Image: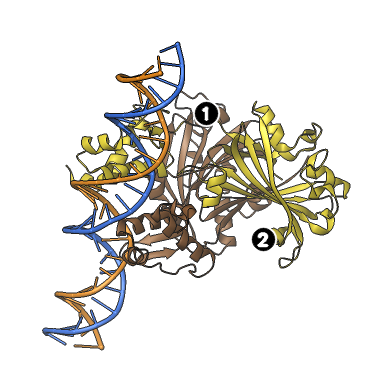
Chain colours: A yellow, B brown, C blue, D orange
Amino acid sequence: MTSAESAQPASRRIADALRSAIESGELRAGDKLPSERTLAEQYGAARNTAREAVRLLAEQGLVVAQHGRGVFVREPRRLFRFGSDRYSLANRATGLTPFRLEAQRQGKVPRIDVPSIAREVPPRDVADRLEVPPDEASVVHRENHYFADDEPVQIVSTYVRWDEAQGTLLMEAKSGPNGIYGRLEELGHVMTNIRDEIIARMPTPHEATILELQSGIPVLEVLHTSLDQDGVPFEVSRYVHRADLTGLKYELPVQ
Amino acid sequence: MTSAESAQPASRRIADALRSAIESGELRAGDKLPSERTLAEQYGAARNTAREAVRLLAEQGLVVAQHGRGVFVREPRRLFRFGSDRYSLANRATGLTPFRLEAQRQGKVPRIDVPSIAREVPPRDVADRLEVPPDEASVVHRENHYFADDEPVQIVSTYVRWDEAQGTLLMEAKSGPNGIYGRLEELGHVMTNIRDEIIARMPTPHEATILELQSGIPVLEVLHTSLDQDGVPFEVSRYVHRADLTGLKYELPVQ
DNA sequence: TCAACCCACTGGCTTGAGCCAGTTGTAAGC
DNA sequence: GCTTACAACTGGCTCAAGCCAGTGGGTTGA
């Protein structure tokens, strides 16, 4: 044992061995790893140490543990891509919302839950972008959960101005033809420019529950602002995507 | 103890208690958590159980452990924003590369390491986008590490065609005025459109080392393609960003 | 034939113990 | 006043043991 190798903790050495087995193709997607007890024996370590090694790999998103069954190399998942053309007027002609359109393209069955629609005090970042007061119930918050083939894909919180939404279909789960953008257009807001601000982070426990996220999978958070023909922001949405199922794509001219 | 509460493992209960202490402001950014041994005593659990609770929070990116010092609530970091205007010709006039420009805007000192420039066989995804053969050494790969105030921010792998780069400054660390885009323009490629494909994932151990990433911080991976006036892809770059320091912003018209 | 049951396997969680390795303040010695 | 040394903290890592809870194959019995 060289000093460089022994400098590493045993759990790390076991994890590295498994990682290279996966990367070399010795263990393939869907394959079952040796059980914790077997690994412990193989490497002359305690079960907790082998367990720690597996946890490291799970944290890196390489493997998934299934209670009672075993630990499996994660299958690379087909990505649900969201292109910057998802808001384009051409797509609007289909009468489908961006999510339904993308689901259809990929041959998946979309489902949209609307757990709540309520007048609320906006979060700070939303208030800033929608240009409404941050300290009063100035917005309507529509929370949607999106599923593809009954698998949760994203959580979307949409915010529009309360004074505009009041008494319209924007307060209803079924918002009418072309969804909320149809209603907002009737209110005089033609979507002309969009601004998407993107970060990645680990999910909150609440998000992990809704999105059925296993350990080692981050979320992509997109804070979207729609601007109308006068440059007025009229809708802000926060998209929280499962990062293992979702990718974003932006195509744009260089001015 | 209600059945709902007792259904949760002890480590989870401790973690939840700490999480709500943080969210309620009882524990603020930079504050030190009770030590593992103290937590164990407070909650009547073994040290390993308290330790597991802290690990859960670290995995969620809420806290950072420092050997010998304690566990601290993570400070929200100022984001290094990369806007979609980073490639714009207006910025080109400054003679600075996008990274140097963004660093300057935020009053940080940029540093760029160029650990390697070499002719290589391209990765599959790069070959597809650059429209070069995936099975021969058809590209030049420039690997750069970017630092702001000596803190690593991103790893960038840039790929250009070998037959174009051969014998030019594209093979050198110092690629001349306006960086590689200046040279590529001399080769007849005016950047006209860009395509950015974005995913989030956990870092590989190698990336975690270079980017000095602690547990619970994902990376943002951007696969960027530059298209010239004829729609020909002439450069592909893979950006691997620290997600705790980096955000992306895209502003575009809806066509 | 089929359902019910059981048992051996899997990971999930906790305990309590011990040693190591950074960090930091304090006391001792120069 | 300064440096050195120590001691008391911190987290890092491992061990051995035990019990629980899902899973799935095989056996048993109707």
Tell me the quadrant of the picture where the C terminus of chain B can be found: top right
Marks 2 and 1 close (CB-CB < 8 Å) = no
Can you identify the residue that label 2 sits on?
A123
Q: Nearer the viewer, residue B225 or C24?
A: C24
Q: Is residue B187 visible?
A: no
Image location (x, y in percent) of residue A84: 69, 40
Where residue B69 sits, quadrant-wise, is bottom left
Q: Is residue A107 visible?
A: yes
- Is residue A160 found left or right of B111 in the rendered image? right
Image location (x, y in percent) of residue B238: 52, 40
State the residue at coordinates (44%, 60%).
B63
Q: Disc 2 or disc 1, which is closer to the eye?
A: 2
Q: Is residue A65 above or below residue B51?
A: above
Tell me the quadrant of the picture where the N terminus of chain B can be found: bottom left
Can you identify the residue that label 1 sits on?
B127
- Is residue C11 found left or right of B220 in the rendered image? left
Image location (x, y in percent) of residue B188: 63, 35
Where residue A154 sits, quadrant-wise, is top right
For label 2, the SS is loop
Q: Which mark is residue B234?
A: none
Mark 2 belongs to which subunit? A
| Label 1: few (<14), some (14–19) or many (≥20) C-alpha neighbours in 10 Å | many
Q: Nearer the viewer, residue B249 or A34?
A: A34
The amino acid marked with disc number 1 is Ala
